Image: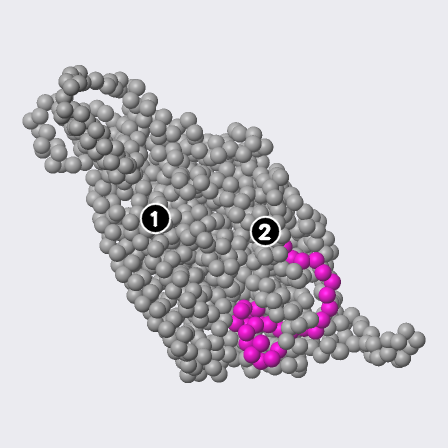
């Protein structure tokens, strides 16, 4: 076990390919023969031929150098495999590994780990004992484990207060000259605490975490109140169009739709002095008190005092420590101003019970929500409590709100835990599997510690296999991140520190944030991994056996969303260009109804209390996943995903899926462009909305999921009825640029198909060893060296026929050469899959948020959570900047060409 004070690069340096290949050479006693020559020093031909020959050799070497380096790497792989076959004779099959990964996870173990993690507060940078405990458990299970620390700029809550003030009357003229000044009385003071529930022990802990926002500003502000709906960019645009001013106001916004920090960011830009955020029960679906359901703990509805904590960092501008963007926050690191990344106005999260008097105080003041269109009147869940959803502002001389927020900012350590199973054949190819450990509350039973318990079960399962002699082909790094809740801190700092190594070694990153809050499987991933996710979910039985034998894949829609932000895959994909996937089980949907309803009873999805004290072990056990069956299933899925990535000899990617997705993305950008320049006739009467209803539903936070059109709605710009001549020329040039993108995608699609076809042929030849196959042997390239095994396990039947009458020594030699050649081809294919995602990185980064380097995927500028596709193009279209749109089309085209070249 490594000392936690000394961060260790998670790779076995002594097991490099070059060293193993050199050892292979020594074992086989390779000899170099020198050819004896004689030359006539006076020969004219020698004087001419030798310089010419030398020149040709040098020129040929220069021209062939890239190819030679590729072959050298492949030969190193082949040499390592050859050495491995002699050192290691795997004594159990890949089918046996799969059996271990499916049978080891248990419901009881999940419950045990979950009880431990949710027993006390574990805010980022607190509860070091949990990090040490996790490290020690992983070490017991066979992982080489250590803790690595970073010094992070964080805030801790000191005090806060929210008061509704009403004018008491006017003072008479006095000597102080303060004639007519208004005196105020406190009409209501928010409790800002969550109720203690006797049957839920974590809600009554004395050291529970107060309700606050990570990275919120300190301040004591007072102003009239304005209701801003969900606080999306478009909501604020609607207010501007209706001449509702936010200057000097305290805004109150509903949670939902977009990242909470962006709600505060736009309010700040428009002159607001503070922000209150609350959870409206109208967004809770069927399970509401208005529909007759009892609140938690007696029923599935929202506990009225529940408060959603969370970070208000501007995550779509850049994650990680806001004082060290782009480099790791180590002791002594230079620190800059965080102002670009965090708010300058105070904000406080409140319950809907505390929000009620403030919303009721708005009744009769200003416009009604219905006056601003259909996007303001959906899911209004407090109408039965006397809330009319007026916009305001409240009269400044009659009703105001005082918001007091005191935060203590300091630099403090956080602790990532890393556990490594070193690869035995390809140790410098790495699969990273991560989940964050920190939570806003003492519980965190769903977010994140249900996933932490699941990750423990996966590590334990691989430990069982390792104890029996199994080793992965590639290195597996398990990570328990700290500081995710504040702004993806632990994972981002780690990626920034080890970026050069990760970009050379990483094959994929697998993320698990919330393990199981219900029975519906969901995934977000880059297209390279879509096929693998479908494959793995078809290998795991669903706990829902209303149809006997059905798998998770059978109960799932099959839809995979683009990755946006809000979890630890962000730095891996958007900054390092590493193929990434996120998986989870959530509540609701057809699968939930099929799994939970019985005897004709109506099933209702229980409300998950996100970032609240009620995200507790008790809630998870009673409502989220009774019996923890879906937690166990997720451990099986995560284990198989990891095993395929770390053990399949031919990387389980599919480049054609990426090319198909890219064409879809180009088509959606073209559709967005056409809608922008030719909006619907009624657009001007509905706040000049130029997006489809479905798209706007997502951007405004009414629907789940993330369509490309909606996620791309990063900025709001109304389209004019007629374009200037410059606009017309710019639009014409952009149309031509989109046509070029079509051609670039077509070229990429052709080479992607060729690569996939080659990979499939290789899988057929070495498929006896691919993870998940029915074979009981190791891969053909690493099979035992006995002649009988060679003959029985020969992958190429034609080769066997050719060697039938050859001498035994010749058959041995040819088969060895054949295996080396096969290894070279496998290495050639795998390298192209591994580095495809990196080709989509643009070093200059996105406009005004240069930390994000990926030209295909990024969080939407004004959504934060939802994944935008071709963000540079989409955001240029939104603001009607055709010069910039063409510029980004050129950048994307160049990256597509680089990707196509990389697959040749």
Sequence order check: which comes first, mark 1 or mark 2? 2
Res. 776 image quadrant: top left
Magenta-span inclusion, residue 228: yes
Horizontally, residue 371 falls left or right of residue 880, namely right
Decide if residue 855 is in sight here: yes
* Residue for point 48% across, 73% down: 717
309 sits to left or right of 425: right
Q: Where is residue 529 in the image (x, y as percent from the top left)?
A: 35, 50
Q: How far apart are marks 1 and 2 (CA)?
A: 30 Å
Which type of secondary structure does the marked residue at label 1 adopt? helix
Residue 549's spot in the image, x, y percent? 32, 52
- Residue extending furthest toward the right: 175
Q: In which quarter of the image is residue 635?
A: top left
Quarter of the view holding residue 56: top left
Image vertical order of residue 601 relative to residue 415, above or below: below
| Residue 223 lies in the magenta stretch | yes
Mark identifier at residue 257: none
The percent coordinates of residue 887 (x first, y second) are 40, 62
Q: Nearer the viewer, residue 403 or 744?
A: 744
**Left or right relative to 311: residue 598:** left
Which of the two residues, 881 or 541, is positioned nearer the viewer here?
881
Determine which residue is flagged by label 1. 836
Residue sitting at x 30%, y 63%: 740
73 relative to 290, above or below: above
Look at mark 2 in the image and give the residue it sits on.
Answer: 322
Residues drawn in magenta: 215-244
Residue at 32% of width from left, 51% of height from top?
Answer: 899
**Residue 873's x, y, as percent?**
41, 64
């Amino acid at each position: 076990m490594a000392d936690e004070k000394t961060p260790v690069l998670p790779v076995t340096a002594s097991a490099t390919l070059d060293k193993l290949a050199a050892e292979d050479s020594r074992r086989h006693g390779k000899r170099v023969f020198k050819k004896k020559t004689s030359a006539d020093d006076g020969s004219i031909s020698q004087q001419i031929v030798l310089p010419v020959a030398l020149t040709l050799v040098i020129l040929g070497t220069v021209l062939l150098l890239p190819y030679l380096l590729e072959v050298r790497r492949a030969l190193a792989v082949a040499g390592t495999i050859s050495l491995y076959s002699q050192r290691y004779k795997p004594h159990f099959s890949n089918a046996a590994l799969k059996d271990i990964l499916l049978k080891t996870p248990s419901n009881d173990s999940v419950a045990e780990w979950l009880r431990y993690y949710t027993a006390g507060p574990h805010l980022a940078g607190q509860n070091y004992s949990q990090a040490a405990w996790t490290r020690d458990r992983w070490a017991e299970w066979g992982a080489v484990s250590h803790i690595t620390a970073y010094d992070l700029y964080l805030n801790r809550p000191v005090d806060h207060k929210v008061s509704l003030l009403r004018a008491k009357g006017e003072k008479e003229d006095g000597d102080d000259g303060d004639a007519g000044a208004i005196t105020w009385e406190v009409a209501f003071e928010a409790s800002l605490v969550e109720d203690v529930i006797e049957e839920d022990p974590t809600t009554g802990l004395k050291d529970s975490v107060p309700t606050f926002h990570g990275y919120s500003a300190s301040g004591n502000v007072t102003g009239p109140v304005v209701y801003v709906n969900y606080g999306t960019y478009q909501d604020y645009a609607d207010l501007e169009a209706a001449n509702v001013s936010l200057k000097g106001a305290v805004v109150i916004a509903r949670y939902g739709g977009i990242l909470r920090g962006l709600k505060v960011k736009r309010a700040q830009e428009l002159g607001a002095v503070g922000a209150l955020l609350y959870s409206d029960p109208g967004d809770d679906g069927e399970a509401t008190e208005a529909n007759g359901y009892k609140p938690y703990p007696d029923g599935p509805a929202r506990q009225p005092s529940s408060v959603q904590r969370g970070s208000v960092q501007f995550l779509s501008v850049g994650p990680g420590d806001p004082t060290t963007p782009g480099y790791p926050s180590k002791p002594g690191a230079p620190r800059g101003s965080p102002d670009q990344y965090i708010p300058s106005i105070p904000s406080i999260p409140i319950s809907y019970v505390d929000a009620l008097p403030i919303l009721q105080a708005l009744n009769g003041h200003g416009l009604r929500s219905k006056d601003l269109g259909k996007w303001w009147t959906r899911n209004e869940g407090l109408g039965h409590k006397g809330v009319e959803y007026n916009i305001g502002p409240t009269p400044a001389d009659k009703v105001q709100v005082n918001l007091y927020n005191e935060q203590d900012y300091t630099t403090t350590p956080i602790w990532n835990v890393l556990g490594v199973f070193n690869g035995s054949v390809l140790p410098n190819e790495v699969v990273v599997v991560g989940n964050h450990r920190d939570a806003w509350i003492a519980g965190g039973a769903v977010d994140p510690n249900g996933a932490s318990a699941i990750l423990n079960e996966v590590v334990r399962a691989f430990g069982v296999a390792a104890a029996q002699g199994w080793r992965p082909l590639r290195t597996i790094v398990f990570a328990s991140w700290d500081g995710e809740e504040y702004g993806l801190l632990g994972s981002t700092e780690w990626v920034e520190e080890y970026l050069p190594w990760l970009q050379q070694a990483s094959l994929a990153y697998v993320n698990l944030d919330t393990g199981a809050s219900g029975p519906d499987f969901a995934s977000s991933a880059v297209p390279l991994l879509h096929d693998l996710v479908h494959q793995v979910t078809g290998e795991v039985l669903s706990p829902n056996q209303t149809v006997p034998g059905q798998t998770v894949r059978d109960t799932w829609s099959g839809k995979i969303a683009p990755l946006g932000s809000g979890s630890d895959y962000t730095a891996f994909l958007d900054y390092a260009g590493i193929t990434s996937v996120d998986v989870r089980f959530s509540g609701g949907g057809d699968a939930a109804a099929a799994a939970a309803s019985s005897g004709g009873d109506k099933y209702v999805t229980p409300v998950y209390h996100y970032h609240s004290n009620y995200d507790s072990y008790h809630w998870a056990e009673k409502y989220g996943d009774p019996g923890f069956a879906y937690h166990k299933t997720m451990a099986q899925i995560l284990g198989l995903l990891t095993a395929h990535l770390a053990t399949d000899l031919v990387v389980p990617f599919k480049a054609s899926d990426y090319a198909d997705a890219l064409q879809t993305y180009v088509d959606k950008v073209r559709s967005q462009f056409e809608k922008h320049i030719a909006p619907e006739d009624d657009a001007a009467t509905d706040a000049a909305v130029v997006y489809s209803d479905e798209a706007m539903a997502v951007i405004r936070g009414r629907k789940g999921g993330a369509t490309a059109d909606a996620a791309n709605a990063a900025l709001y710009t109304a389209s004019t009825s007629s374009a200037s001549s410059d606009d017309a020329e710019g639009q014409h040039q952009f149309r031509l640029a989109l046509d070029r993108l079509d051609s670039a995608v077509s070229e990429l699609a052709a080479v992607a198909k060729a690569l996939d076809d080659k990979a499939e042929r290789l899988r057929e030849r070495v498929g006896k060893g691919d993870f998940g196959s029915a074979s009981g042997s190791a891969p053909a390239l690493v099979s035992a060296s006995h002649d009988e095994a060679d003959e029985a396990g020969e992958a190429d039947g034609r080769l066997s026929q050719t060697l039938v009458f050859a001498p035994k020594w010749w058959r041995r030699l040819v088969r060895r050469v054949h295996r080396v050649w096969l290894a070279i081809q496998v290495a050639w294919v795998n390298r192209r899959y591994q580095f495809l995602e990196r080709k989509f990185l643009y070093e200059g980064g996105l406009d005004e948020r240069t930390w994000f380097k990926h030209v295909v995927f990024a969080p939407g500028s004004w959504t934060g959570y939802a994944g935008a596709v071709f963000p540079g193009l989409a955001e240029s279209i939104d603001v009607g900047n055709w010069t910039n749109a063409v510029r980004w089309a050129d950048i994307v085209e160049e990256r597509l060409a680089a990707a196509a070249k990389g697959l040749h």
